[in-house]
Image (cartoon, grey):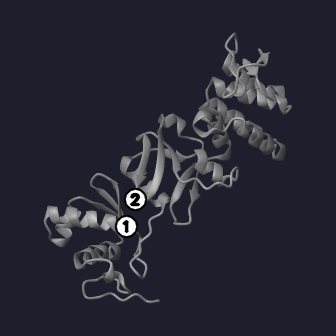
Amino acid sequence: MNKKINPVGCISNGINQKFGMLEIKLLSYLQLRKLRIVRTGDIVQALGISKQRENTLLSNLCKKNAVIRLKRGVYLASRQLPSGGFSFISEYEILEYLMKEYGAYYMVSGPTAMYYYGYTEQIPNKIYVYNDQIYGEKQIGSKSFVFMKTAAKRLKGSELVKMNDGSKIPFATKSRFLIDCIYDWNRYNTIPAVYLWISKEINRDSAFTEKLISNANRYGNKSVQKRLGYLLETLNVDSQRLEKLQRKINAGKSFISYIPNKKARGKINKKWGLIINAE
């Protein structure tokens, strides 16, 4: 259906039933100029209104979900307003623009990647994001995010995924995600399930082993390297490959549980520095 532009440049088809004239004027201004980001002060000059009126205008548009407040003084407008005046801004658009505002390195992992790679059928209600700028759970618009702050050097091992909304989001690669599941097992409750996922991936493609070892050595820690090393050994991975992990751990007299959330009772594996408390 063709959309008509009224004298002040707004889209018709019922939008004026939801928005006031000044709100329509602003939304039309943004849409016609294809502007997504609005900063405090922009509207004062563009519409010739006071700063107080600008604050009220942006606040009202946030309540009507026409724009979303990314952070203080910065708002994200929808790409366009469909007929009826209902706007939509996806969680990935929010994430993409928010990370640009912070100048952050980031990648999506955790339960979001778990669903993306098909290890669960449960759709996560939050987007889990490793980044080097912000920390904590945040509600932005109607979307929920968990931001986990880490060093920039740990934010590699990702690939860009083009989402349905057109945004391009860095997701942890499958091999990196599986290492995250061992590293952050307590956050995601992914041990021992991740051991089964890894076993299936290696049975499907033995070359996947090298990717796991590389990611464990680059982005894991000794606990990750010990647990992965033992698991790969039970899967009859070549000993030369396992040496890359073994050189990192210096097992010595320090032992950890293979299944960290169970009692530390079982055989001692001196090679990997593990208490084998479950198979």
Viewed as shown, does residue 194 lie left or right of 72?
right
The residue drawn where x is 64% and y is 48% is: 114
Extreme-top residue of the structure: 253
x, y percent for residue 212: 71, 37
Q: Quadrant of the C terminus?
A: top right
Q: Are the residues flagged by discs 1 and 2 in contact, CB closer than 8 Å?
A: yes
The residue drawn where x is 70% and y is 49% is: 119
Mark number displayed over residue 65? 1
Q: Label 1, secondary structure: give it.
A: loop
The residue drawn where x is 50% and y is 61% is: 167
x, y percent for residue 122: 64, 54
Q: Quadrant of residue 61?
A: bottom left
Spatial separation of the CA atoms under disc 1 and disc 2 = 7 Å
x, y percent for residue 258: 72, 26
Indicate the amino acid at tag 1: Asn
Q: In front here: 268 or 43?
A: 268
Indicate the amino acid at tag 2: Gly
- What residue did someone put label 2 on? 141
Q: In front here: 41 or 217?
A: 41
Mark 1 packing: few (<14 Cα in 10 Å), some, or many (20+)?
some
Q: Quadrant of residue 227?
A: top right
Viewed as shown, does residue 194 lie left or right of 17?
right
Q: Is residue 119 above or below residue 50?
A: above
